[in-house]
């Protein structure tokens, strides 16, 4: 085995499995994989103080945002005011506890938990080693599930919808929430997964001297999906972080296709069923996603109509098609254009969660528009189904192993058995 101190210089790309020897990275710079351009590691300036400052400021802004009113609406002499804490309460009172749970988790609980975890991990807090390992294992897994900024976009879309009915006022907690969205994003940007793990536990020794520019699969090596440690291909248990994994995600394509099929099945009723019901002067007017887009377009709100159409109809549809295409290509039926498929995978991972914007619009409208017989808005079951579609497609993208696409380069040039996750 190679000594552990030499392990710091080596890293397998988590996206294409190429072995890289990391250079000395200047402060403020990052190293990327030469084959797929995936960011491997970064050398941030003040790696402890900066994320600590951003995380503390973010938590303080979150506290302020929950203490005061958020938005006010005035219609025909009647006024309605909500705080962030009242949004899930309204949904629970209308028997939509599922939407309330999603709001609490994605908008408040997960972002707050991530900020607290960053504070505990980047600073020398006396914690049991098992607790540190557990927190580090879940921190980056939860990153994509924090949707504070997506909720903020939903609030802005709600403003445009509500301006047609009355006057909208921004209350005290609106500005702390805006700052929280920016600060929590910045705190994550200042955290590097590899550097964070090196401060928690040392890298294990390399099984044997690696070769630059050769995939780990060809060398009998694999990368830990959690802490990036390089391990023997047949070793399932990571001696550093304790995560159990294999050289490729087990049954990756099967899981991805099963989740994709389920999301397609749910997507049809999610678009046909009403996502919200508007009650005006005692008359109820249910509307689905497309009806809302058409209404906004007819009212002249072209930018907002385009945003909703892209985020709620175009993005989910294209995402499901893209995931199916990725599975088709990884299964050996595509045109072997790994760079194009990798770009598609990165786009799918980035844009998928933004489809939740329509769900958050409904959350804001149903909590704020409570004017009795004059006008009220209620969520409907279509919103629940649509939220499930977004969640399932996000999980489908996570279960897909992008290294399967790059393995085909090796399989087409070297005649030897290929280890994969199928």
Image (cartoon, rainbow, N blue to C red):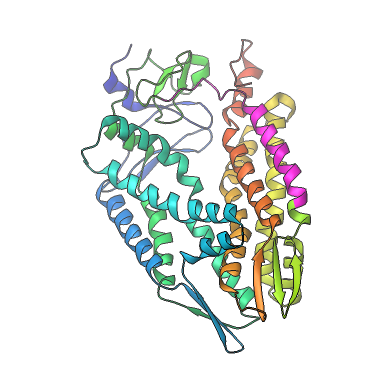
Q: Which corner quadrant of the image does residue 47 belong to? A: top left
Q: Nearer the viewer, residue 404 or 149?
A: 149
Establish if 200 lies above or below 97: above
Q: Residue at x 30, y 42 (%)?
A: 26
For the stretch drawn in magenta, what is the main secondary structure?
helix
Residue 28 seen: no
Number of numbered discs visible in the structure rendering: 0
Q: Quadrant of the C terminus?
A: top right
Establish if 182 lies above or below 16: below
Q: Residue at x 59, y 27 (%)?
A: 406
Magenta stretch contains residue 50 = no
Q: Quadrant of the N terminus?
A: top left
Magenta stretch contains residue 260 = yes
Please provide the residue range marked out in magenta.
243-269
Residue 178 horizontal side relative to residue 51, left or right? right
Establish if 95 lies above or below 139: below
Name the spot of residue 29 as percent of width and height, x first.
36, 45
Q: Nearer the viewer, residue 159 or 17?
A: 159
Residue 277 horizontal side relative to residue 196, left or right? right
Q: Which corner quadrant of the image does residue 19 belong to? A: top left
Q: Nearer the viewer, residue 290 or 16?
A: 290
Name the spot of residue 194 as percent of width and height, x first.
36, 35
Q: Nearer the viewer, residue 22 or 200?
A: 200
Name the spot of residue 265 as percent of width and height, x first.
76, 42
Residue 321 seen: yes
Name the spot of residue 312 as percent of width and height, x first.
68, 57
């Amino acid at each position: 085995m190679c000594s552990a101190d030499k392990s710091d210089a080596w890293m397998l790309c988590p996206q294409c499995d190429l072995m890289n020897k990391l250079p000395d990275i200047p402060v403020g710079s990052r190293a990327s994989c030469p084959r797929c351009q995936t960011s491997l590691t970064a050398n941030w300036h003040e790696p402890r103080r900066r994320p600590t400052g951003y995380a503390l400021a973010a938590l303080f802004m979150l506290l302020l945002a929950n203490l005061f009113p958020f938005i006010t609406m005035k219609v025909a002499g009647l006024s309605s005011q909500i705080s962030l804490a009242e949004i899930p309460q309204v949904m629970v009172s209308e028997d939509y506890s599922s939407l309330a749970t999603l709001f609490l988790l994605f908008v408040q609980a997960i972002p707050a938990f991530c900020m607290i975890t960053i504070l505990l991990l980047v600073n020398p807090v006396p914690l049991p080693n098992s607790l540190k390992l557990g927190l580090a294992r879940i921190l980056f897994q939860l990153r994509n599930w924090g949707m504070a900024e997506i909720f903020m976009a939903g609030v802005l879309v709600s403003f445009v919808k509500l301006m047609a009915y009355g006057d909208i006022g921004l209350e005290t907690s609106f500005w702390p929430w805006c700052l929280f969205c920016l600060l929590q994003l910045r705190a994550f940007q200042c955290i590097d997964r590899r550097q964070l793990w090196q401060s928690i536990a040392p890298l294990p020794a390399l099984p044997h001297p690696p070769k630059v520019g050769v995939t780990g699969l060809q060398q009998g090596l694999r990368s830990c999906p959690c802490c990036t440690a390089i391990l023997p291909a047949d070793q399932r248990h990571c001696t550093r972080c304790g995560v159990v994994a294999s050289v490729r995600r087990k049954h990756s394509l099967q899981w991805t296709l099963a989740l994709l099929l389920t999301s397609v099945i749910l997507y049809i009723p999610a678009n046909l069923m009403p996502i919200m019901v508007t009650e005006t002067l005692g008359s109820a007017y249910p509307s689905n996603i497309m009806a809302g887009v058409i209404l906004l377009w007819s009212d002249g709100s072209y930018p907002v109509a385009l945003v909703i159409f892209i985020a709620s109809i175009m993005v989910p549809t294209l995402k499901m098609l893209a995931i199916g295409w990725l599975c088709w290509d990884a299964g050996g039926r595509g045109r072997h254009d790994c760079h194009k498929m990798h770009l598609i995978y990165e786009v799918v991972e980035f844009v998928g969660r933004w489809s939740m914007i329509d769900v958050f619009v409904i959350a804001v409208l149903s909590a704020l528009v409570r004017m009795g017989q004059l006008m009220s808005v209620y969520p409907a079951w279509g919103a629940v189904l649509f939220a499930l579609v977004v969640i399932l497609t996000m999980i489908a993208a996570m279960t897909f192993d992008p290294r399967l696409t790059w393995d085909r380069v090796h399989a087409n040039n070297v005649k030897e058995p290929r280890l994969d996750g199928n």
